[in-house]
Amino acid sequence: MKIILRRISQRSAEFLGFDRMGEAYPIFTKVYTFLWLYSTLETVFMNTLLIRLTGNSDSVMYYKMIIYVVTAVAMHGSALIAHRLSPVHSIRLSAVLYGIMYLFLFILTDYLGVYMPYLAVLSGVACGLYWCSHNILLTLYTTERNRDIGVGILGVINGIITLLIPIVSGFVITAYPNNYLGYRIMFGVGFASVIMQFIMSLRLYPVEHKTREPQFRLALSLVRQRKSVRFVFCSEFIRGFREGTFLFFLNTLLFEFVSDERLVGLNTFLTGAASIVAAWVYGRIVAAHLRGKFVVIATSLLMGATFCLFFGLNSVSIVIYSIVNAFLQLFVVNASSVSSFAVFTQDEKARFCLGESFAFREVSLALGRVVGIYVVVLFPKTPTGYISAMLLLTVTQYLVALCIRVIRRELSLFEQQQITGASVNQEPLEDAQR
């Protein structure tokens, strides 16, 4: 029996791509798993709870906008902690803050409409502390050769959790409607997940300290000196237009049509299945030189799918569109993210200010997300208005593909210059040896 289980485990690892990753990566993915578990609970059902308490979806929009802005600011604090202590310490502090947030969610469930801004700030700080350090560790635990595979593995984990948790939560919340007991039960599950994440973070592989001083000035100098860095920020800003809104908009829209948490959970379950397939496909077929091309293909298909909604916007069409969106959007998100990892690790100088670069990148992404949400708010709250806003946000993703192609070209030029420079520097040494 042990032999059979060992073979199943080995085949599963090979199927996902773990056999091509380093020893530190499996522990890193476990920390990410618990993070995504409780984040999914907050992302999906915090929205529905706010709509129930306030009676409109505008509160969800403002809640997300606060989180995005605060996250970008908190990432700079995470970069500072990463230098002075370690990225691992920042992740642990994030877990502590998330635990406090879930305690407040459990206690103040009936009053979330009143305390929403404060909880959004707490969530944003915790989010910023985690994701900046997550990005740093991801670049350190992977290489340019296996980074697409590593991101694909995280996408599979993301999809599995999105597949299972929301549908279970939806039925639990519906089964215990009195005094929002179902919500409180799931917030308790979220708190338990935070504790497990903190325990797993104690096993993370340590990373080497290059300096204990923050390097924000160096990161800013790279923005001025390197075209590739500037286009990373442009890519993330434009990606944020659509991503920030679609992270919650479709579930919110579905809940307005049918006020049933079970349907929202089912929708998230199906999108999770699509994400798993997309993450596996991405890790298997996308290489560095193909990232821009796949973004163009994904955006074109998303444009066609969005246009089809003009023929009927209802609960069924929203669910179908959510599945298509979950599959195709992953190619845009992963291609843009992995391109930024390549730029931020292209040489020793860039790696020296890794945390600061990710913090500045998050500012670009957060600004894009806020702009995208603001665009949706400006459109009429009618089916035609919703679809028109979605089309506008989708067409901007062609610019992401353009940015990725420029980034790829700049990286190739940089590599050629490095090789040429190395050859020139070696000539005197070779002459001396002769």
Image (cartoon, helix red, strand yellow):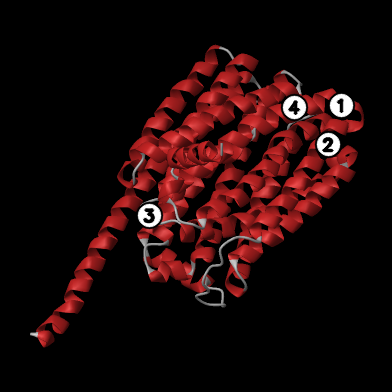
Above or below for 309 versus 99: above
Label 3 sits on residue = 144
Query: In terms of depth relative to the viewer, which is nearer, 51 or 419?
Result: 419
Q: Residues within 10 Å of mark 3 (few under 14, many from 20)?
A: some
Q: Residue at x 56, y 36 (%)?
A: 1
What amino acid is at disc 4?
Gly
Tell me which numbered mark, 1 or 2, is placed earlier along the sequence: 1
Position of residue 101 measured from the top left corner of the image (x, y, whole percent): 79, 50
Coordinates of residue 123 in the picture (x, y in percent): 72, 50
| Residue type, numbered disc 2 | Ile
Which residue type carries mark 1? Tyr
Which residue does the image show at 79% across and 33% down from the upper left?
A: 49
- Residue 63, picture quadrant: top right
Question: Alpha-carbon distance for marks 1 and 3?
Answer: 48 Å
User: Residue 271 got which mark?
Assistant: none
Q: Which residue is mark 2?
A: 185
Point 50% across, 75% down: residue: 210
Look at the image and tell me in which quarter the C terminus lies.
bottom left
How far apart marks 1 and 2 lie (CA) works out to 9 Å
Neighbour tally class for label 1: few under 14, some 14-19, many 20 plus, Cα within 10 Å? some
Mark 3 belongs to which amino acid? Glu
Q: Residue furthest bottom?
A: 432
Residue contact between numbered discs 2 and 3, judged by CB atoms under 8 Å: no
Front position in the image: 298 or 173: 173
Q: What secondary structure is marked by label 3?
A: loop
Q: Which residue carries the number 1 mark? A: 176
Whether label 1 touches label 2, CB < 8 Å: yes
Disc with the residue nearer the chain's start (3 vs 4): 3
Q: What's the distance in space between the residues labelled 2 and 4, CA to CA?
A: 11 Å
Q: Are marks 4 and 1 in contact (CB under 8 Å)?
A: no
